[in-house]
Image (cartoon, rainbow, N blue to C red):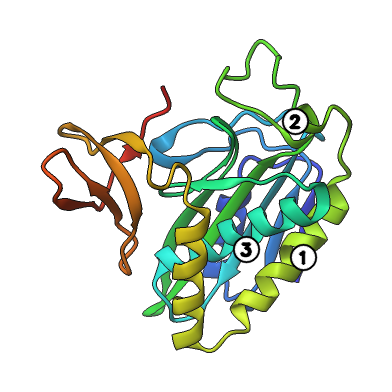
């Protein structure tokens, strides 16, 4: 079921309201504009009207939310490659990167209703965002900025939903195994040095992969592997 809004405050908030009202699995909220879009840690998400793909999907599958997040991120990277030829990557835990610039992000929230859980996965993808606009961070980019031409949003949406349907159609053991492998392959700066702020200290090491639980695996200076459960990979 698809709910479309010309403008809304937040597609995640709309999807959460629908989930609490008992909407079916894979209900989608799509908007042309968000007036109060947000990312992780309460950050705002800038998306002028018509510039981006803004959507949230309600998932009731009993799988770890980290893998439902990964499913949407992987589907987005695969759709971007199919529609534009651009090789995007997933910056742990949930950003979509083209080179060293952010092109999108995934925000996941879990809500409860009558003892049952629903996972709301929101996606914001900069499709035709003017990356040089005054209110856009200089670390951001868009598909059109990378290609030097406008990109149609509708085919991108269909391509992403098609890939997501394929992933969600996998049985549980295969779903987890396949997504873990794809996440490893698509990990931004894999085998390269990164800096990670875990809220207490800034760690430096080589991003060697992602654990089965979704933690970032870092090889630090003494050669040992540490796992970061919560944090931000810093963009220099």
Report which quarter residue 173 is drawn in.
bottom left
Residue 136 coordinates in the image, percent (x, y):
62, 19
Residue 169 coordinates in the image, percent (x, y):
63, 84
Query: Spatial distance from mark 2 to mark 3, Cα to Cα?
Result: 27 Å
Q: Secondary structure at mark 2?
A: helix
Identify residue for label 2: 146
| The N terminus - image quarter | bottom right
Within-10-Å neighbours for mark 2: few <14, some 14–19, many 20+: some
Q: Which mark is residue 2?
A: 1
Residue farthest to the top? 134
At x 16%, y 32%, the residue is 201
At x 33%, y 52%, the residue is 208
Horizontal arrangement in the rendering, residue 147 relative to residue 221 (left or right): right
At x 54%, y 49%, the residue is 106
Horizontal arrangement in the rendering, residue 146 relative to residue 184 (left or right): right
Within-10-Å neighbours for mark 1: few <14, some 14–19, many 20+: few
Identify residue for label 3: 57
User: Can residue 18 be spotted in the picture?
Assistant: no
Q: Is residue 128 above or below residue 190?
A: above
Query: Spatial distance from mark 1 to mark 2, Cα to Cα?
Result: 30 Å
Query: Spatial distance from mark 1 to mark 3, Cα to Cα?
Result: 9 Å
Q: Secondary structure at mark 3?
A: strand
Q: Earlier in the sequence, mark 2 or mark 3?
A: 3
Q: Is residue 210 above or below residue 143?
A: below
Q: Earlier in the sequence, mark 1 or mark 2?
A: 1
Q: Earlier in the sequence, mark 1 or mark 3?
A: 1
């Amino acid at each position: 079921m698809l709910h479309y809004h010309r403008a809304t405050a937040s597609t995640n908030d709309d999807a959460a309201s629908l989930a609490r009202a008992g909407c079916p699995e894979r209900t989608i909220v799509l908007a042309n504009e968000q007036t109060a879009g947000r990312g992780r840690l309460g950050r705002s998400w800038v998306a002028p009207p018509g510039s981006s793909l803004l959507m949230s999907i309600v998932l009731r599958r009993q799988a770890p939310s980290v893998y439902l997040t990964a499913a949407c991120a992987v589907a987005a990277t695969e759709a971007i490659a199919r529609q534009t030829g651009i090789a995007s990557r997933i910056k742990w835990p949930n950003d979509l990167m083209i080179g060293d610039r952010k092109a999108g992000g995934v925000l996941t929230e879990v809500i409860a209703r009558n003892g049952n859980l629903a996972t709301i996965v929101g996606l914001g993808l900069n499709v035709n965002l003017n990356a040089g606009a005054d209110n856009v961070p200089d670390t951001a980019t868009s598909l059109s900025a990378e290609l030097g031409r406008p990109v149609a949003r509708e085919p991108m949406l269909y391509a992403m939903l098609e890939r997501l349907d394929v992933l969600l159609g996998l049985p549980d053991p295969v779903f987890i195994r396949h997504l873990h492998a794809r996440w490893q392959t698509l990990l931004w700066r894999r085998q390269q040095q990164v800096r990670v702020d875990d809220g207490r200290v800034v760690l430096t090491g080589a991003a060697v992969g992602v654990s089965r639980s979704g933690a970032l695996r870092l090889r630090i200076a003494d050669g040992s592997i540490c796992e970061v459960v919560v944090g931000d990979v810093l963009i220099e």
